[in-house]
Image: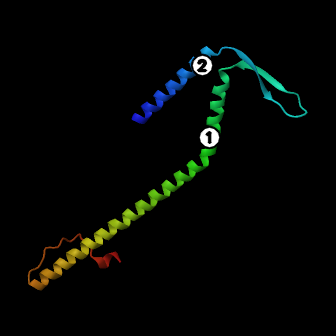
Amino acid sequence: MAATVLVVIVLIVIAGYAAFFAVVNPEWVEVITFKFSGLPTYTQEMPVWVLPIAGMLIGAILMAIALAGSWGTMRRAAMLSRQELAAEREKSGLRAKKVSALTKQVTGLQAKMSGTEPVVADDEETPEEEQ
């Protein structure tokens, strides 16, 4: 939530600065939009304040395109890590059940050797059943 508020505040500051820049620089300039050797040069008049904003927008679009590949790679790696973690948790749960069953079996054998019978629930698995 705090990150969202911070992003909104930064965007408001940027928009305020852009508005201030537009008010301070109302003059128009002629900008070359296309120039190539041997072809006619195309120009267009636009306000000065459009140039930095257009530059920021073009830069943001190019950065988004440049980062899209690495972002996809990171998302795939995170997804694979989550799948591996889920598989390991499942294995760990099975091992814990097996250890619990073996512990109860050892307790039962110790009780048998001492002459008293332990109380064992019917729904518990023994290690032989898991293999």
Residue 5 percent across, percent down from the top left: 42, 31
Say which quarter of the image contains residue 62: top right
Q: Which residue is mark 1?
A: 63
Q: Residue at x 33, y 75 (%)?
A: 130
The C terminus sits in image quarter: bottom left
The N terminus sits in image quarter: top left
Q: Residue at x 61, y 40 (%)?
A: 64
Q: Specify few, some or many for label 1: CA neighbours under 10 Å numbering under 14, 14-19, or 20 or more.
A: few
Q: Considering depth in this image, is 26 or 131 the residue closer to the camera?
A: 26
Looking at numbered disc 2 in the image, what kind of residue is underneath it? Phe
Say which quarter of the image contains residue 104: bottom left
Q: Residue at x 13, y 83 (%)?
A: 112
Badge 2 element:
helix
Q: Which of the two discs, 2 and 1, labels the residue nearer the N terminus?
A: 2
Q: Work out which residue is located at the far left of the displayed protein and give it.
A: 115
Looking at numbered disc 1 in the image, what kind of residue is underneath it? Met
Classify residue 114 as left or right of residue 35. Answer: left
Classify residue 50 as left or right of residue 87. Answer: right
Q: Considering depth in this image, is 8 or 10 the residue closer to the camera?
A: 10
Residue 33 percent across, percent down from the top left: 78, 27
Q: Work out which residue is located at the far front of the displayed protein and give it.
A: 24
Q: Which residue is mark 2?
A: 21
Residue 68 percent across, percent down from the top left: 60, 46
Badge 1 element:
helix
Q: CA distance from mark 2 to mark 1?
A: 24 Å
